[in-house]
Amino acid sequence: MNSSLAQVIILLLLGGFYLPVIFFAVQRREEGQGGATWLVVLYALLAMVINIAEAVWQAGEGTLLFQELQTYIAFTLGVIMMVTLQVFLKREFWWAWIGYFGAWALGLALILTNALNLQDTLWTNGELILYRSRLGPAWVILGWIILSIALILNLSNAQRQSRQPLLRGRLAYWWAPIFFTLISDILLFSGILITGQPLRLLVAVGIAYVVGTHYVPDLRNITRRILIYLASIIALVGFYAGGFLVIQALFGKNENYNPLIAGTVAALFIAMLFTPLNALVSRAITKWMKGDQYDASMTIHQYSESISNILDMDRLSSIAIGIMLEAMQIDRGFLFLVDAERQADGRRTYKIRNAQNPEERQHVAVELEEDGVIASNFIREQKPLLQYDLDLHPAFRAASPAERNWFNELRCEVYIPIFAKKQWIGMLAFGSKLSGNRYTREDLSVLSAHANQTAVALENARLVDNLMRLNQELRQARRTLEKNNQELQRIDQAKSDFISIASHELRTPLTVIKGYTEMLMEDPKLENGQKTMMKGIHDGTMRLHEVMDSMFDIAQLDARSLIPHLQPVDLARLIEKVCSDHIKAIREREQNLTIKIPSLPLVKADSHLVEKMINHLMRNAVKFTPNRGRITLTGRQIPAIVNLPNGGVEIIVSDTGVGVDPNLREVIFTKFYQPGELGKHSTSKSRFKGGGAGLGLALSKGIVEAHGGRIWVESPGYDEVNFPGSQFHVIFPLTKLEDGEVHKTGEPAILEVTPAIAK
């Protein structure tokens, strides 16, 4: 009785031990995998229930049928373990094993209910007998064998196919639960019923740990350290024993021999050998187990010296990656540039592009959203990110498929961000180690140190790369501009050719029309109505003739064949004459005209061309000055200056018109420029803002420059409401005088025209 009570207590205690396992699994469900975690809970609950049931059976002195029930439970737990593994590996057909369990349960139900009407003795050869009552356990054991083989094969294939050492290391922890399951179930099927099946508790603990722990210790590294420790102990003990025996053999027969002193000497000898011996053993075992061996400080020093003065991006990428691949024995690596870009909608993205390492294939650039899980992790943590985390850690489940695919296509295991002045400017990416080992914390620290060393060199190389790219764009823009300039020159030449041809070809017929209309107008036999019509034809012809004259002069300017016929010209008298031709238009527009020109020196000029120039300036002032506006012409003599060694004469045409846009002060002097809409063209010479051929100011500039002078405009701006006005300045240079000669001066010109009277 006391024995049964002890077994009950043991069973209840074993059942209670499952509660911490369940609590651990539930608490770590966020760090592990949700589906697999709940399957672990189910496994632990079922094992705990069967332990409690066994305690009840022990207290009630039940039958041996409980052992058969344990067989069924063993198979059920095996199915739960298989489904847990499938869910952990993210296999799509994990539900197939639930179907397998359903088929097994159906077969077991048919056997237990004898739905097939089987005989009690199914088979016998005289010595062996197969009873129907043993068919159920046999059916279960057969299913368990198939399940166990499949479990081992699935785990082996998963480890072999995984390209991530961290995942392979995590899968290695599955072997312990599988091993304990096999031992426990084989003992059970052999008829050895262990109280409480304690190995199942170890299975539950192992599965809960591997499912709920994202970063598991490296078993290979643990094994290596244990072997180094044991080998060092054995070597030290061997050296100590050997040294002690040598000393005893040499000095043992000496009467002064003291074993304590001999042991002390041997111990001193071992102490001297401890550090080099331990290092030797460590290197030997590490090499035997294909461990990683490199000098981190030496690698960082070499890396820093190699990239410190590199400004070429391709060379920096090649050397930086090459050093790391060789030092740490890595199969592949990349250097990426990160460009922060602000989108039109205000979103900030990080564009990751290859640094164009010629030894590696290029990758399409990817844009990471600033608020995305991957970019925010890099910016927030500023530490290496493992592909293992991208694939399995719950924090990265929300990553977009495009971002996941881009990182998967790199086939790398670790990504190290590069920051300079708290700005993310680059990223290093490295693949698997040639040894197949995982990246340790020491490895990640070394890679982070290399990223920090790369930051300054990368920033300098980026500046040079951006400058070279900008220079290339500027060269391309210059080539495009030169091509456009050539095209514009061709178009301008074609326009000049057209003007030249048109002005020559149209002058003759216009002269004929002008002559005949004048003859008809003088014919006394013509009626008044006909004379009015002929006058209209004559006025239009004169307007066309004037335009043709301007076009002819422009053609001469383009051909550089406009040669002024220089003679002394009194600008005041010439201006007065031109203004008298505009008095009618000024009075029609109710404008005020004021001429205040003092006595000025005579200039050597072509009076005909200068008259055209003044006429164009006056017509321009009348057209762009509103009704009741004011036009003023003034003049002054300019003393000798650098650009005018003999002095000059300046004429200023001022108005209170719409003004000139400061950005168009040079443009208005080009051919065919129109300040307003083309639809406002008019044959009227005085209509407000009326259009014209667009040749007046261009011809005026050509005439002034042909005389060696200069013309420009000054205006606060263009305003059709407030009318700021404009001032056109024209300077004609004076000729050099001989000794004792003085400039001849003309008479002053003073004139004022108002809408009512003229003085």
Image: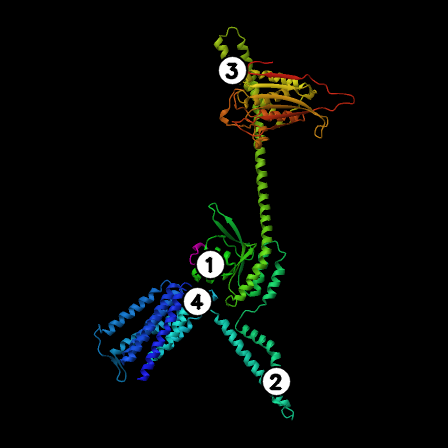
Amino acid, disc 4: Thr
Please tell me whether mark 1 or mark 4 is closer to you in this view: 4
Q: Look at the numbered discs 3 and 4 and tell me whether their residues touch, using CB distance below 8 Å.
A: no
Secondary element at image label 4:
loop
The chief SS type of the magenta part is helix
For label 1, the residue is 408
Q: Residues within 10 Å of mark 4 (few under 14, many from 20)?
A: some
Q: Residues within 10 Å of mark 2 (few under 14, many from 20)?
A: few
C-alpha span from label 3 to label 4: 103 Å
Q: Determine whether 303 is above or below 221 in the image.
A: above
Amino acid, disc 3: Ile
Amino acid, disc 1: Asn
Query: Quick one: label 2 or label 3, which is nearer the N terminus?
Result: 2
**29 left or right of 473 in image:** left
For label 4, the residue is 213
**125 left or right of 593 in image:** left
C-alpha span from label 4 to label 2: 48 Å
261 vs 343, nearest the viewer = 261
C-alpha span from label 2 to label 3: 137 Å
Task: Give yes or no for residue 615 being in the magenta stretch.
Answer: no
Segment tinted magenta in the rendering: 396-409
For label 2, the residue is 264
Secondary element at image label 3:
helix
Query: Quick one: label 4 or label 2, which is nearer the N terminus?
Result: 4
Residue 200, quarter of the rendered image: bottom left
330 vs 631, nearest the viewer = 631
C-alpha span from label 3 to label 1: 84 Å
Query: Quick one: label 3 or label 4, which is nearer the N terminus?
Result: 4
Amino acid, disc 2: Thr
